[in-house]
Amino acid sequence: TGWTYWICWVAVAMAEVTAIGLYIRFWLPGVPQWLPGLIALAVLLLMNLVSVGLFGEAEFWFALIKIVAIIGLIALGVFMLFVHYKTPVGYASLSNLVNDGGFFPKGMSGFLMSLQMVVFSFVGIEMVGLTASETKDPHKVIPEAINEIPMRILLFYIGALFVIMCIYPWRDVSPVNSPFVEVFRNVGIPAAADIINFVVLTAAASACNSSIFSTGRLLFSLTLTGKSKSARWTAKLSRRQVPARAIMISTGAIAVAVILNLFLPESVFALVSSVATISFLFVWGMIVLAHLRYKKQHPRGTDFPMPFYPYSNYLILAFLGLTAVIMIFDRAMLSALIFAVIWIATLFTLRRLHADHKAHEDKTKDGI
């Protein structure tokens, strides 16, 4: 699971590198899609190699820009709804939510096929639990953080999409560009479109920055107990106490996105986001199964029990399985699914071989 989690964040970073190229082309359409991603990756790599403090400072400003911009976007959208702002294709109105086919214009199949990208939007949510060991008072902080997640989703995800779809009919929004940028450009507010494009650009840079930080430390921890020369070489800290070698190797893996953007600019985002999604489905499934096993061994429970256990666990596993099955029926996602299955099968085989080899060594030592 550890190596799969590493590949999860590598794939996420590859998707964000691709997004950076797309957002820069909003201003500079003549620039090759791969070039902005390469430059951004080099800058973020240098920032992560310098110090942890610089990473934290960058993330603070990235997060502040995103929060202020989304709240401003929602406020502007609500104002446009109240004044029935005229757009090139009509007016900003609640009726845009149900026009053009209602809530399920493509039927149930369209709804189900969207699950892959919806799931991709929530990658990283498991990190709330992973930070438990690093908080001073996890019994207080973790429940508060988890309970705040639904409200944040309602505001920053559903609230923003609600406003966007009320302002502009969904049929007229291009799936290639950011819908936020597309809407404000089409309704005749170019300044707002430029601002939103800057915001989504910083959001992509923030996600890529976090991914470089995470993948470097994941690779460092995965190789820390390794006995091979390559593992010992990777698990070294720099003079600044940064896992520089692990960060550089992880960034090298992420840089594959630059090559993909050079040869497959039209399909690279769908490909790498699908790889990330199916990998996260596996990791989340393992987390749920681990929780089921933990509860069987510790039936007395905890201070913050999972609601409706064990039925909620089985419901989550069913949803994850459904999402994986749906990906089989989409050609764009099928190749990513095949890659993920091969990756997981390879890791499982290598682990079994390693376990058998270790058992053989133990028997040999006992015989001696």
Image (cartoon, grey):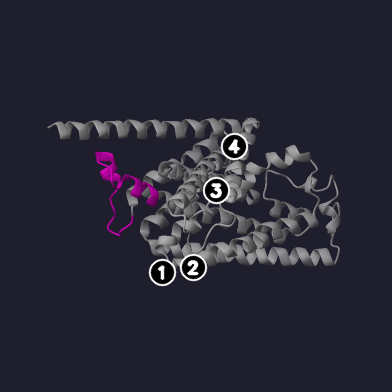
Q: Residue at x 80, y 48 (%)?
A: 103
Residues drawn in magenta = 217-242
Secondary structure category for the residue under label 2: helix
Q: Mark 2 or 3, which is nearer the eye?
A: 2
Sequence-wise, the earlier of marks 2 and 3 is 3
* Of pointers 3 and 1, the one earlier in the residue sequence: 3
Q: Give the x, y percent position of residue 218.
A: 39, 49
Q: Earlier in the sequence, mark 1 or mark 2?
A: 1
Observer-nearest residue: 116 or 230?
Answer: 116
Q: How many marks?
A: 4
Residue 235 included in the magenta stretch of the image: yes
Distance from the alpha carbon under mark 1 to that under mark 2: 8 Å
Spatial CA span between label 3 and label 4: 22 Å
N-term-proximal mark, 1 vs 4? 1
CA distance separating discs 1 and 4: 37 Å
Residue occupied by mark 1: 136
Give the secondary structure at mark 3: helix
User: Which mark is nearer the camera, 3 or 1?
Assistant: 1
Q: Amino acid at mark 4?
A: Ala
How far apart are the alpha carbons under marks 2 and 4? 33 Å
Q: Disc number at residue 16?
A: 3
